[in-house]
């Protein structure tokens, strides 16, 4: 099992011939991901170390049966790339690109929600199902196979927590980086729903940060729909209001979006919240051993 | 990016939203000249990117050029919530019969633009929402549907505005504000107060305007509005260097890689009993130049007493970061204590490199928490 | 039962205070339709012979529990009225207005399909479920209760056929005028699906005309999904290509949209097509007596 | 509403789609003047709202002003499929190296705009679709998504256009054509051929353009392009009177109420062995003025030998229509035989009114079919 990406993933990399696309596309393939195609307009017919390159996503679907897309194109071309993927029938779109204008993402989000496609990102590290597939820029070597589903708005913080879990002998079913932008294709709820349904996932860890109210919504969702143990970490307790903390979405607007409010919302539904990455890893370890 | 009142009004005007005529002035003399051009009774308003300027004495009436010059003299240089007033906006004074409130915010939760309109203007909208929620008309817009005239009607009727002359003008302003919001890539456009004069004219008397930084590339005119001099000197330097940096108020300088880990590092320093001096995200890189730039920004803050390097190598390799740190120290001759924690890809190699070079002010710690504690001690 | 409108219909008339809206709104009420509200901006608080008028559809939903809207506003304001109704949570929108620009309707159509609302029209006579509710401008006195579901792109032609059926002693479950514009909210298929599911409907009559390919699509749909007997009439066998025959949608473009092609498509799936309204009524009568 | 080639090109040009420079001329003298202004080798093209003008001799090359005048002389006044040429378009002749085809149609079936692009231009697209479907790139656009650049790429790559210089220009034209299509409320915009010159320039050499009649109210500039003189005299009169009328070629004048019933009436006349002279829809009314206007249009066609009034009263009341008919007959002194069939609301009363007045040329029949038969007999 695992969620979002797995052994059935047939990946097309949009922007495969760019330096980032090439580096990570090949890294993903080396990990064992089935990278079936790349897309770069004007470079159709070429290949990147044996991966065929097409001019359009539609061709990659027809000729290489791609079902998942990984997007590395620059911000100004990224929404076009997302529309192209979804309209070509790609079911899962994972967009690494950051700095996509928020209004453009609002339109994209509204459009693809109506189409039933899954989108992860933008401004995200991607999705890794250890032992099955890695789609994005997550350093897979930090993680091992196991029963913990991890969903996070942050990249390196996820690696930190994953590393601490690995040191405690715990592995992951899937790590989902949903992205740090104000509007992302999937909020916490979508992966939570999948983790709940995934037989391999035994415990869920949610890694949030300041800004927006997705953690609060996740708390309500967990209360109503999730039976598996959920633990959480929130970053940004010391962040001042009105300042963008690295991620475009990590900003406290007025009094909304504080880490404290999120922690309280999560605790109110019985989700333990660690105060440091180390503590959350220890909490997960404790809970995991009870649960297993 | 936040805009000053006068900049927001300039955008309002471009989209046909009525505002009062005014002039910008950076000196009392300019204020006098502006007042002479405008004539009549005037208002002199501090231009600062913070609220509460009225209470702080940043908004004053003036009955002519002499008075405008005097009031500008009073206001220029004022410190309002840590923002020094360097410019005033002088506009024709308005007779106010009613104060309304109209805004569009980028509602992240609903993933839709959110309109709010109330006749209870002039005060904070949060207060209206809490004390008199029925007086606040709210409406989400589906971005694919776009603006439709019924939305303006729902707001105007919902807010209980029943004068047909006001209705007509506000229906127009509601529509124009949507265009302004979308076409400026705004995250917030707020008119508070939206006034009605005794003659029944409706005008925007103030503006609050935030534009999406990621969209500035397609709005060079708005990007140029950025007032680089108003920023904190460290934040200004960071912008010049392209470093992701937020000034805080403590003594432990922080440098992490990745936004989430850097935020977490700030928190962990607090947990360890320290006061972070800043948030700084090294990003995906870790080369010497990136480290040098970040250190330059961090050390330009004289409050900094120690520096905490918290690196989790993913794509970034710790050995490269270690070399970057050594190169930076070499270039910059920093004498402050530097605590380094390296983990993840090639962490051992990185630690070995640092141990071999062993600069006297460099402390390598095995975990994030221990490193934070050490940095806090060293800052004491 | 019956479909689209029935005893559960709670109707709001958008444009009730206009001359057409008033005339037909009151006519609908006199027939027994539960007309709960009217909407005219600026006339909120007034009433039309006891029917309360609101400024917005949202108020009519909140204050009068309207669930169906009938739109009589002029063409330039009609799409706004449709968006208003759907966004206010109205589940069924019936739009009589004609001459709405086709591009505007494309947007409306695409938008409301995503919302799950039912739309009938524009440029349609409305929907009548004899003995239950009449929403629109159909002269109800021509029709009687019975087992024939009638769906048509035309108004008066429907009356003609309904009249002939009535003279043969046959009544209707529901008469649905889907409208004569190039883009209408519901094609033949939507009412066909409902008639198939409606226990009161025993035989279905489809009244088409030149233009578009909705009759051809209906034929395919009937073949795959409809078990009840279906009969048809098509108008416009003698229409020249390239000319708009009264309805904006009734135009043969190049060689597409001819009555002959539609007749053949329907006959190919076993649907009998009458050559005159009289003949189709007789065919229905024959089939009905066999079927009942 | 269909536009002439030169009108469609005018719109193309407004949206930045390249066309050849040209001038309109209604006389050989104007053609000469245009040719003098333009200079060089020219093409003189008949402006008619029908296809096949090339084969009919409506397009000719001219190598200068004298020749252009002569060719215009030849073409003006030509009858092409029943359309008399009253204007020619004179433009600089293009060297053609390739002929492509690009269009956007309003796809009613899919309820989406449909792009088509092929390198097999210059011929009928139906032929390409049938004989070489792989050469035809087709793409639907979701109107809420709107145009996205990838759509242009899919078309260009899908059609197999591989010259980068052509690609670049055509990607731009594809995008501009969408704006042109949407912002003109077009039902069809077609460029056939879209040519590539030996120098590699891409241009629209012809245009086919249909605009939605219902949207003309917001395009007064396009509405003005209507060539009222080109219409059939009856159709022109109908437009002036606001009567929904289509000229056919027979002897039985037809007047129904409602589009569907009127179309059906035309069919039933054919079933009865007659030849309809027209389609005419009285609409929802039935008052004397509406009947008079419609009869004026119908009787202005000299081929008409009998008139068939087919009224099904719904909202329209048959007694009112009966009175309208009598009033019209009174005003107009029509001597042609008129067959009336009234049914539906107040039909009996209507029939009684007609029976009482009993004008000698009025025949009342009980059913649509019998009435049609009688009208056909009377036209014979």
Image (spheres, coloured by chain):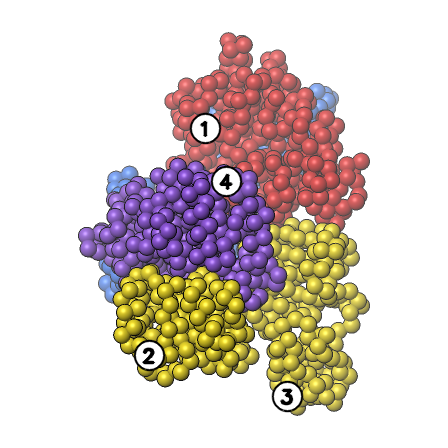
Chain colours: A purple, B yellow, C red, D blue
To which residue does mark 1 refer?
Answer: C218
Q: Secondary structure at mark 2?
A: loop
To which residue does mark 2 refer?
Answer: B359
Neighbourhood count class around disc 3 (C-alpha, 10 Å): few under 14, some 14–19, many 20 upward: some
Mark before the other along the chain sequence, 3 or 2: 3
- In three-dimensional space, the C-alpha distance between marks 2 and 4, rounded to whole angstroms, equals 52 Å
To which residue does mark 3 refer?
Answer: B27
Judging from the image, mark 2 belongs to the subunit labelled B
To which residue does mark 4 refer?
Answer: A226
Disc 4 vs disc 1: which is toward the camera? 4
Neighbourhood count class around disc 1 (C-alpha, 10 Å): few under 14, some 14–19, many 20 upward: many
Work out whether D291 lies above or below B340: above
Q: Position of residue B242 (x, y in %)?
A: 42, 74
Quarter the N terminus of chain A occupies: top left
Disc 3 vs disc 4: which is toward the camera? 4
Q: Tell me which residue sits at (74%, 44%) in the image.
A: C54
Asked if labels 1 and 2 share a chain, the reply is: no
Disc 2 vs disc 4: which is toward the camera? 2
Asked if labels 2 and 4 share a chain, the reply is: no
Work out whether B284 lies above or below B69: above
- Rendered image quadrant of residue C212: top left
Asked if labels 3 and 2 share a chain, the reply is: yes
Judging from the image, mark 1 belongs to the subunit labelled C
Q: How many marks?
A: 4
- In three-dimensional space, the C-alpha distance between marks 3 and 1, rounded to whole angstroms, equals 76 Å
Disc 1 vs disc 2: which is toward the camera? 2
- In three-dimensional space, the C-alpha distance between marks 3 and 2, rounded to whole angstroms, equals 51 Å
Q: Position of residue A269 (x, y in %)?
A: 57, 45
Q: Secondary structure at mark 3?
A: loop
Q: Nearer the viewer, residue A161 or B170?
A: A161
């Amino acid at each position: 099992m695992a969620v979002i990406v797995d052994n059935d993933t047939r990946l097309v990399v949009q922007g495969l011939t760019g330096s980032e696309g090439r580096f990570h596309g090949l890294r993903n393939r080396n990990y064992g991901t089935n990278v079936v195609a790349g897309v770069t307009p004007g470079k159709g017919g070429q290949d990147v170390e044996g991966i065929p390159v097409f001019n359009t996503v539609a061709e990659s679907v027809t000729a290489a049966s791609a079902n998942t897309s990984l997007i590395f194109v620059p911000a100004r071309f990224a929404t076009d790339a997302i529309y192209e993927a979804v309209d070509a029938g790609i079911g899962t779109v994972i967009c690494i690109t950051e700095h996509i204008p928020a209004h453009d993402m609002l339109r994209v989000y509204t459009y693809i929600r109506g189409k039933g496609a899954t989108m992860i990102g933008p401004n995200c590290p991607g999705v890794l199902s250890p032992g099955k597939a890695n789609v994005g820029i997550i350093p897979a070597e930090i993680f091992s196979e196991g029963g913990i589903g991890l969903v996070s708005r942050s990249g390196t913080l996820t690696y930190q927590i994953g590393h601490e879990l690995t040191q405690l002998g715990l592995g992951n079913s899937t790590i989902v980086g949903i992205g740090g932008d104000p509007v992302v294709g999937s909020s916490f709820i979508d992966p939570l729903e999948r983790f709940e349904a995934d037989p391999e996932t035994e415990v869920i860890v949610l890694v949030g940060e300041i800004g927006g109210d997705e953690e609060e919504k996740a708390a309500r969702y967990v209360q109503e729909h999730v039976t598996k143990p959920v633990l959480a970490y929130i970053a940004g307790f010391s962040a001042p209001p009105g300042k963008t903390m690295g991620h475009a979405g990590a900003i406290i607007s007025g009094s909304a979006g504080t880490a404290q409010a999120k922690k309280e919302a999560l605790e109110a539904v019985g989700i333990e919240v660690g105060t440091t990455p180390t503590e959350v890893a220890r909490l997960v370890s404790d809970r995991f051993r009870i649960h297993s | 990016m936040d805009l000053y009142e006068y900049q927001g009004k300039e955008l309002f005007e471009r989209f046909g939203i009525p505002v009062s005529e005014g002039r910008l002035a950076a000196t009392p003399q300019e204020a006098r000249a502006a007042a002479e051009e405008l004539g009549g009774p005037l208002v002199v308003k501090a231009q600062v990117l913070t609220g509460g300027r009225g209470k702080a004495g940043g908004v004053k009436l003036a009955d002519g050029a002499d008075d405008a010059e005097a009031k500008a003299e009073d206001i220029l240089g004022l410190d309002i919530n840590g923002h020094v007033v360097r410019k005033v906006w002088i506009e024709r004074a308005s007779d106010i019969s009613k104060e309304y409130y109209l805004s569009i915010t980028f509602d992240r939760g609903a993933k839709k633009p959110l309109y709010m309109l109330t006749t209870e203007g002039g005060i904070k909208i949060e207060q209206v929402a809490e004390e008199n929620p029925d007086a606040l008309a709210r409406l989400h817009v589906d971005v694919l549907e776009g603006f439709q005239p019924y939305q303006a009607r729902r707001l105007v009727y919902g807010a209980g505005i029943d004068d047909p002359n006001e209705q007509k003008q506000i229906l127009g302003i509601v529509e124009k504000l949507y265009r302004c919001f979308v076409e400026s890539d705004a995250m917030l456009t707020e008119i508070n107060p939206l006034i009605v004069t005794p003659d029944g004219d409706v005008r925007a008397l103030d503006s609050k305007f935030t534009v999406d930084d990621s969209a500035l590339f397609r709005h060079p005119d708005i990007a140029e509005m950025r007032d680089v001099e108003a920023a904190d000197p460290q934040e200004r330097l960071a912008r010049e260097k392209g470093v992701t940096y937020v000034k805080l108020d403590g003594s432990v300088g922080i440098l992490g890689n990745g936004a989430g880990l850097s935020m977490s590092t700030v928190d962990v320093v607090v947990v360890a009993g320290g006061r972070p001096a800043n948030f700084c995200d090294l990003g995906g890189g870790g080369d010497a130049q990136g480290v040098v730039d970040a250190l330059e920004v961090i050390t330009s803050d004289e409050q900094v007493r120690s520096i905490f390097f918290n690196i989790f190598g993913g794509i970034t390799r710790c050995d490269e970061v270690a070399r970057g740190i050594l190169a930076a120290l070499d270039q910059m001759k920093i004498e402050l204590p530097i605590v380094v924690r390296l983990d993840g890809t090639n962490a051992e190699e990185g630690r070995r490199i640092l141990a071999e070079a062993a600069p006297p002010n460099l402390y390598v710690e095995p975990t994030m928490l221990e490193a934070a504690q050490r940095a806090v001690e060293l800052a004491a």
